[in-house]
Image (tube, rainbow, N blue to C red):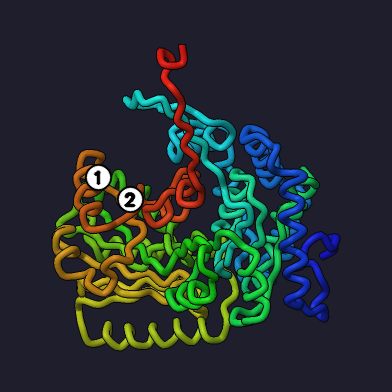
C-alpha cells in the first residue's frame, strides 16, 4: 500500500519516534490551526466532512478500496464486515445530522462561530460563544475504527488541532481517514496528526501531554488511569472506559409472523464488527411464554449466524482469542451433556460462531467474536434484580425487540437503572451521530464557554 508520508504513522517501520519529534509535530499543528483552521466556519467544516464521507461511500473511492483490500490483514475484520461498518458510519454524515448534533449540544448551530443569544425563556441581555480546545489529543483504542473517526470529526467541528495516538499496529484505518481528509482539504489535513506507538512509552507521552490542552482516551480502566496520572495540572481529561451491552426480546414479538425479522436483527448486532466493542451484545435475554420458545429462538439464531458466515465471514483471530473460544465451548459442551437447561450450537470445524442457551439469569461476559449467550427470563425485572450485579454502572446499550408501547415502558425502567442508550435490536453497533457516548455530551464536554453580558436595549438608549 502506497501512501504519501503526510503523517507520523506513514513513516517506515524502521523509523523511530523521539520526544523532540513529537514536540515539533505538536507545535506545527498549533501553528497550522492558527493559519488554516480558526477562520473556518462550522458550515464549512460540515461541508468538508460530508464530502469526505460521500467519497467513502463510493465503491471506486481509493481509500475505501484500500480499506477493503488491505483491511482484513491489517485489522482482522473481513471485507464484508468492514464495508458494512464503514457504510453505517459514513451514512450518518449529512448536514441535517450535523445540525441536529450542534443544536442538541449548544442549542444553536452557530454557537461555535458567533456569540448567540438565549434560545429559551431566558431574558437576560447575554450571549454565549463555545470555544474548542486549541490542541486536542486522542488516545485511541485499537479494536474499532469508528470511535476514532468520530473523535477526529468532533475535533474538526471545534476547529481544534489534533493528534491521534493509536495503539501499536492499529493506525491503518485512522491513517486512511486522515489521508482522505487531506485529499479533500490539505489545509485542514495539516491540522491533524496520526501517530502510533506502544502504550507506556513515558518519554513520548510526556512530550505529548506537555503540549496539549485536552485529552480524550478510550480503553480499559487501567489504561484510563495510566493516562490520567501522567497529565499535567490544568489539562482537561475525558475518559471512556470499558462498557458492556445486551439485547432484550419480549414475548409479544416471538410469533411466527415476526420471528424471522427479530432473528435477523439479533444477528445484525452479533456480526457487526464481529461483536467487538462496547455496543455489541454479550447476552440476549428472551422472555419466556412466547409462541416461539426461547430455546427455539437460540436455535434459529444459530441457523442465521451460519448463513451470515457464508456472506460476511468473521475475521481472523489471534491464537489467544481462538483458545478462549475453544475453552468456553468445551465448558458449555460438558454442561449441555449433563443438564437439560443448557444447550450449545456451534460452527462445525471452526470457531466462527457459537450460541449458548442457558437458564442462569446472571449476565455472562462473552469472549466475543460471535459468541453469544441466549438466556430465558420471566421478565426484565428479574434481570435487574438478580442478573446485573457484576456489571452495575457499566452498561452502555440495550437493544430491544418489543412492541412500541412496551419498549417505552422498558426504556424508562432501564434508564432508572443507569443504562445510557436504548435502541431497537439490530442497531446496537450503529448509533446516530447525536449519540451521547456513555450518557455524556459529545461536544459540550470539550468546549469552554464565554458569556457576553451586555446592557439592555433601554439602558443603552
Q: Quadrant of residue 147?
A: bottom right
- Given residues 457 and 275, the one toward you in this image is 457
Residue at horizontal 43%, vertical 64%?
278
- Identify the disc placed on residue 360: none
Apparent side of residue 56 relative to residue 409 in the rendered image (left or right):
right
Residue at horizontal 57%, vertical 67%?
139
- Identify the disc placed on residue 407: 1
Gap in angstroms between the C-alphas marked 2 and 1: 9 Å
Count the numbered circles shown: 2
Dot 2 surroundings within 10 Å: few (below 14), some, or many (20 or more)? Answer: many
Residue 157 x, y percent position in the rendering: 60, 43
| Kind of element beneath mark 2 | strand
Which mark is in front, 2 or 1? Answer: 2
Residue at horizontal 45%, vertical 75%?
225
Apparent side of residue 223 relative to residue 408 in the rendered image (left or right):
right
**Eyeballing the image, is 375 above or below 402?**
below
Amino acid at each position: 500500500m502506497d501512501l504519501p508520508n503526510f503523517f507520523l504513522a506513514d513513516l517506515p517501520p524502521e523509523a523511530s519516534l523521539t520526544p523532540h519529534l513529537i514536540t515539533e509535530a505538536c507545535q506545527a499543528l498549533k501553528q497550522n490551526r492558527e493559519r488554516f483552521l480558526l477562520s473556518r466556519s462550522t458550515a464549512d467544516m460540515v461541508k468538508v466532512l460530508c464530502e469526505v464521507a460521500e467519497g467513502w461511500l463510493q465503491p471506486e473511492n481509493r481509500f475505501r478500496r484500500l480499506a477493503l483490500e488491505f483491511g482484513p490483514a491489517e485489522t482482522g475484520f473481513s471485507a464484508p464486515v468492514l464495508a458494512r461498518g464503514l457504510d453505517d458510519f459514513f451514512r450518518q454524515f449529512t448536514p441535517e445530522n450535523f445540525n441536529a448534533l450542534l443544536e442538541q449540544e449548544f442549542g444553536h448551530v452557530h454557537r461555535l462561530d458567533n456569540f448567540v443569544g438565549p434560545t429559551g425563556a431566558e431574558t437576560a441581555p447575554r450571549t454565549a460563544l463555545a470555544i474548542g480546545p486549541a490542541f486536542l489529543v486522542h488516545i485511541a483504542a485499537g479494536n474499532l475504527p469508528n470511535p476514532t473517526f468520530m473523535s477526529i470529526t468532533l475535533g474538526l467541528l471545534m476547529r481544534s488541532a489534533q493528534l491521534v495516538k493509536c495503539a501499536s499496529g492499529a493506525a491503518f484505518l485512522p491513517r486512511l481517514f486522515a489521508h482522505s481528509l487531506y485529499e479533500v482539504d490539505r489545509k485542514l489535513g495539516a491540522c491533524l496528526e496520526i501517530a502510533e506507538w506502544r502504550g507506556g512509552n513515558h518519554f513520548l507521552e510526556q512530550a505529548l501531554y506537555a503540549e496539549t490542552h485536552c485529552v480524550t482516551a478510550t480503553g480499559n480502566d487501567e489504561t484510563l488511569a495510566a493516562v490520567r496520572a501522567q497529565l499535567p495540572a490544568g489539562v482537561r481529561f475525558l475518559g471512556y472506559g470499558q462498557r458492556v451491552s445486551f439485547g432484550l426480546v419480549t414475548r409479544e414479538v416471538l410469533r411466527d409472523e415476526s420471528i424471522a425479522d427479530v432473528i435477523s436483527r439479533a444477528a445484525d448486532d452479533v456480526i457487526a464488527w464481529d461483536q467487538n466493542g462496547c455496543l455489541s451484545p454479550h447476552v440476549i435475554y428472551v422472555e419466556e411464554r412466547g409462541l416461539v420458545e426461547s430455546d427455539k429462538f437460540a436455535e434459529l439464531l444459530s441457523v442465521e449466524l451460519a448463513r451470515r458466515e457464508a456472506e460476511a465471514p468473521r475475521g481472523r483471530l489471534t491464537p489467544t482469542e481462538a483458545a478462549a473460544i475453544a475453552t468456553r465451548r468445551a465448558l458449555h459442551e460438558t454442561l449441555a451433556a449433563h443438564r437439560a437447561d443448557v444447550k450449545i450450537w456451534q460452527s462445525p470445524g471452526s470457531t466462527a460462531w457459537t450460541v449458548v442457551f442457558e437458564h442462569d439469569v446472571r449476565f455472562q461476559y462473552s469472549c466475543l467474536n460471535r459468541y453469544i449467550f441466549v438466556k430465558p427470563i420471566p421478565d426484565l425485572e428479574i434481570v435487574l434484580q438478580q442478573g446485573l450485579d457484576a456489571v452495575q454502572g457499566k452498561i452502555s446499550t440495550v437493544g430491544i425487540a418489543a412492541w412500541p408501547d412496551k419498549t417505552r415502558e422498558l426504556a424508562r425502567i432501564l434508564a432508572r437503572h443507569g443504562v445510557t442508550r436504548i435502541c431497537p435490536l439490530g442497531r446496537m453497533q450503529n448509533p446516530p451521530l447525536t449519540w451521547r457516548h456513555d450518557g455524556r455530551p459529545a461536544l459540550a464536554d470539550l468546549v469552554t464557554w464565554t458569556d457576553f453580558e451586555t446592557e439592555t436595549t433601554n439602558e443603552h438608549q
